[in-house]
Image (spheres, rainbow, N blue to C red):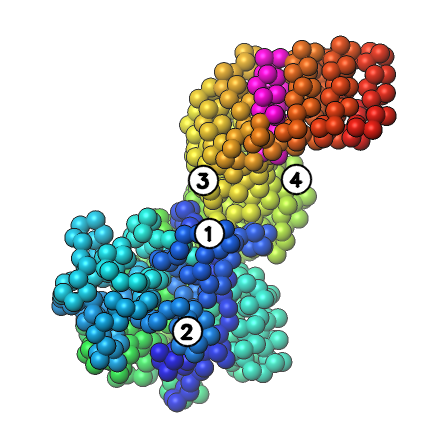
Amino acid sequence: LKIQFEVVSEGISKPGEQTLLKDIFTHVWITEGSCVEVNHGHEIMQVETVSKNTKSEILSIKCSDIFKPLPGQTRPIRTVLMKGVAGIGKTFSVQKFILDWATGKDNQDFDFIFFLPFRELNMITSEKSLQELVRCFSPEMKSYDNILEHCKVLFIFDGQDESRHPLKFEENEIWSDVKKPTSVDMLLTNLIKGNFPIDSSIWITSRPAAAGLIPPELINRVTEVQGFEDQQKEEYIRKKCKNRALADRIISHIKTLRSLYILCYVPVFCWIVVTVLEHTLEDKSFDNPKTLTDFYTVFLIVLLTAKEQKKEKENVLKSNQEAILKLGKLAFESLKKNIIVFYEKDLREYDIDLNSPIYSGVCKEIFKQNSALFQEKVYCFLHLTVQEYFAALHVFGSYQNYNINPLQETMWSFSCLNKGALEKAIQSRTGHLDMFVRFLLGMGMKNNQELLKGFLSGTKDHSNDIQETAGYIKELIRETSSPERCFNLFHCLSELKDKSLIEEFNVTLDKTKLSGQSLSPSQCSALTYYTLLSEKEIEVFDMSEYATSEECVRRLLPVAKITKTLRMLNCELTERCCEDLASVLLSQHSSLRGLDLSYNNLGDSEVKLLSEALRDPNCKLTKLELGSSSKTCIGCNSISVSIQRGTSRDINIQNKTNKKKNKGMSLLEEWCSPPHCPIYFCRMSWCKLTERCCENLASALQSQCSSLRELDLSYNNLGDSGVKLLSAALKDPNCKLTTLRMRDCELTERCCEDLASALQSQHSSLRELDLSHNNLGDSGVKLLSATLRDPNCKLATLR
């Protein structure tokens, strides 16, 4: 294993060139915890909604520690699922883990580690025993008969998303004989379930879309590889580029291209960027790339010239034109079917010559050549985005060279080709065509046509078609409600170098310039796009300043993930809005901690959606305000249950509009002492509370479970008798209240004696008391003033 994993290949390499893993390896950010959010955009674009604030708060974990319980955890970690998008560093992390184990650096409690990638497991169609399966991948173990029964072993299954085995966990029977042959699928499901009588641990890696195929009850820990943080991006670039001055120029250049700099969180994309800029910044025959298509077009040229050692890029492209088209067709047809791994028979179907130099450059051979078990080799593109680029090359080359439209039968113009691609991308729920359409649009630009000379039979003036396409994209932005689709449409405009939409809407990053304006839905999308790409952290985002409709709210909600406090006052929230908002609350990447939903007419269905989100352990909200909401009894019940079972800490409930006391309000009084949720702040002003509520509140304050520090009961008719009950609670040693506000609560001088007695109690911890706008009279004020001189009184502020 040491020999196998100490040397790595980063995409293409020169003949005889080897890279030691320790020389190039850069730690990636790995987080612990299951993320339940549904991603409707292209998988590598999700990082654009990650806040720097969030990164400091999400629990991270070292790769070497994934099988080690955290402090306070007693349950052993047997099965780990590691998620991450394509090229994010899952396999490299596995390799580093194995190498450190093989060299005696870490995880020495494992006696053996067996690495079984799904790409190779797919090749096994015959029945085998577990013992035989191990020997297939580790032939050196043939002389050992009982290692599975007497040793602690770790099985690593890399690339579960590429599995062609169905993994029938429910249908497969129990199988526990390590020496009895059966199907590979039977072995895998029973091994993951722990049915074999062996001391084994399991590590599975997968892209997010396929991670849900394994029943969650079989997983002890879920981790997610988040890729490079900004510091790690620079660290990697300096390791990759040995010329320090050039590395500094590369970092400076990529930082000027914000959206591409963000994408460098993916190590493979970062490698592509460095590979390209190492050439363009030194070779004056290249203009520095600025768009995504620019980078990948130059990368194609660099890739081919590195393999064929030719300096004339036009000749290289011309000599490989047919091969590129065939490879592009394979990429395009497979992209439509979500296929990213290819076997020799797949290549033969497209008449691809495996001996041609282009295939060793573009298709990375990832199968072990010294394997005696399998005769067929396995191929894949260097990265998913490279496959998407080649798919676009196929479509664009077919149109430009042969006037053929692979997307549809009719062919009118380049703008028609673009419109067809955009329509298909918009219709995709997963966004799997988002990058493809960006590449296709970018290839029509003059600079990329010039770079592709040789592959293209000639260049064409597409300026009118590009202008028409840009107009069509603007129409789509106005008509498309999906934030993810709109976001990619703005990226498409960037590929066309069209900034007119932003200039037309006069959207800037300075929020003060937008304050007070009534924005259209498309303007809201523009605001979202540039806010997410901004380097600035947003403490407070007041959506009520911009959102005038359900569509506006939904288009602005992605901003909620990168802000700490979101104000949505009087935004006319609908059920669809609350559904999207609940998704934000559940997002692992969300930094949202404060939410103000005041002055919205939330019905039962809306409240239930939010309640379910609040109940979920992934929800990190610490302050919720629902002022003047016309909630029903059922709605309050849902919120109450969610708070008691959830993690919310600061609650603000106001109800100025209900003339009749809501029955559900009695449930709110229980929030002060739920055993499952420490609540520190509770505002219940304008809630039509009476002295009857004070009895329950007092009981809650005296509970051993009470953690409440601040309570606002202003603008409620509590009366002197209600305060008498609360004053008794203040004397209780279990009461931890430090701030009590009872502004305008119909109080008179008669309550002052009870309050004074409470303040003089040695158990009272009250520091701030607000009794303003009450009829206390001179005698009441004098009594309270005298109390301030008592040595037991801890009050610092009296209003």
First-in-chain label (1 vs 3):
1
Marks 1 and 2 sit apart, C-alpha to C-alpha, by 24 Å
Q: Is residue 633 left or right of residue 127?
A: right
- Residue 706 at x, y percent in the picture: 59, 31
Q: Is residue 67 left or right of residue 215?
A: right
First-in-chain label (1 vs 2):
1
Q: Along the line of sight, which residue is nearer the eye, 257 or 505?
A: 257
Above or below, 429 relative to 719: below
- Mark 3: few/some/many CA within 10 Å (<14, 14-19, 20+): some
Which residue is depicted at the point 67% across and 19% down? Answer: 728
Magenta residues, start to end: 679-702
Q: Which residue is mark 4?
A: 515
Marks 2 and 3 sit apart, C-alpha to C-alpha, by 37 Å
- Residue 219 at x, y percent in the picture: 35, 53
| Discs 2/4, front | 2
The image shows a total of numbered marks equal to 4
Q: Is residue 573 in sight in this rendering?
A: no
| Discs 4/3, front | 3
Above or below, 493 relative to 683: below
CB under 8 Å between discs 1 and 3: no
- Residue 522 at x, y percent in the picture: 51, 43
Q: Is residue 179 magenta?
A: no
First-in-chain label (4 vs 1):
1
Marks 2 and 4 sit apart, C-alpha to C-alpha, by 57 Å
Badge 4 amino acid:
Ser
Query: Which numbered marker is on residue 101?
Result: 2
Q: Which residue is mark 3?
A: 616
Q: Which residue is mark 1?
A: 73
Badge 3 amino acid:
Asp
| Discs 4/1, front | 1
Judging from the image, what secondary structure is the residue with disc 3 in? loop
